[in-house]
Image (cartoon, rainbow, N blue to C red):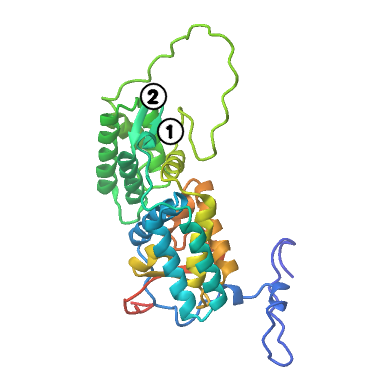
Amino acid sequence: MPENKYDLPATPVPQGETGTPLTRRETREIVTPYAFEVCPNLLGMPTAHPLRRAIAMGIDGLIISGLAKASLLLILPVMTYLIWFRLQAKKFNHVFVLLFATAFMCASATWMPELIVEEDSQQTVGETELSAEQAMVLATSALKIQAESCKLECMEKELAKVAKMLRRAGVDKVAANEMLDGLVQGSDFPAAQWPTYREALLKDLPEAAPVVKAEAKPAQAAPAPLPWYLPDENTHSVVAWVKGIFADLGIGVGWAVFYFTATIAWCHGQTIGKKLMLIKVIQLDGKELSLFGAFSRQGGYGAGIATGLLGFLQVLWDPNRQAIQDKVASTVVIRLGKAKRPLTH
């Protein structure tokens, strides 16, 4: 008997009578180790480096931007990519549907629409605007600071770079404080040293501008609410900036769902970005994803944003470099073209 009524019983698992494996349906009725097993052929395979995965996602983001803007320059390569793999699999009904969809899109698409609108290329932070390039510097530094290999000297170097960028952008001290706090949250930077170090970094930044009482104006209709992906003018959140960048690129949710689901399921776990970066998504049981599995996995991207990007940053510390979308679909992203490594020293 367990010492506490809340403890699990320590009795051994009873043995079956015939030794026949349980069916898939039966494994849902009790706790089994089968759902957590890794295919022996996967053991020792190198996982994809986070930077390689980030570059692949950047490529895929630009492709989805072109699809959402109806650019033939990107529609034709994507549809050709899908049709080629469906032909190899001899799925001719899929080929017919893809050809019909391609012809339909070509009727209204243009070759090179503007993928990035110039007037929307600024990210608003308080009373200051950051360019897309400055936002990318911020995101890159965040990844480096959260990496296990980035020690105190490395973190101080990246924080100094971000502080210099914020100083050039004219960000006030209040907004900069919030930004730097977000960067070091969850890192190994000594908590006792952080307030003093942050103050030294931001000593030259202007204080927050005083609020000027505006003159009374006639009542106006309430402005329309902003879309979910646009931060308001007083938002200093990194997540809000990322959503704003996505909006600037014109990423349509429907196109993202189609692109990630179809390419992962039909092209052997490789989007075009992953194909170029020589990485591949595969299930832990060694099988390739079905359409439903690929659809479930791409839903994990939304969960990654909802968790404040922590779902994506898991690749920096997870033993198998699984991000939240990999956890959802029980997948892992492997590096192709490299030999297996031993599991022990």
Residue 253 percent coordinates (x, y): 53, 51
Q: Position of residue 144 (x, y in %)?
A: 32, 50
Specify the quadrant of the image occupied by residue 79. bottom left
Q: Residue at coordinates 74% horizontally, 91% vertically from top-left?
A: 17
Q: Which quadrant would the N terminus be assigned to in this image?
A: bottom right
Q: Amino acid at mark 2?
A: Glu
Q: Earlier in the sequence, mark 1 or mark 2?
A: 2
Question: Which residue is painted at 40% across and 37% down in the image?
Answer: 181
Describe residue 301's horizontal placement relative to residue 61 as left or right: right
Query: Dividing the picture into quarters, in which one does residue 121 lie?
Result: top left
Q: Which residue is mark 1?
A: 236
Label drawn at residue 269: none
Indicate whether 162 appears above or below 53.
above
Q: Nearer the viewer, residue 299 or 248?
A: 248
> Which residue in the protein does label 2 denote?
127
Residue at the location (35% across, 26% down)?
A: 173
Q: With 11 as the anchor, is 296 left or right in this view?
A: left
Mark 2 secondary-structure assignment: loop
> Marks 1 and 2: which is nearer the front?
2
Query: What is the C-alpha distance between the residues marked 1 and 2?
Result: 11 Å
Q: Nearer the viewer, residue 135 or 313?
A: 135
Q: Height in image: 96 above or below 142? A: below
| Nearer the observer, 90 or 279 | 90
Within 10 angstroms of label 1, few (less than 14), some, or many (20 or more) residues?
A: many
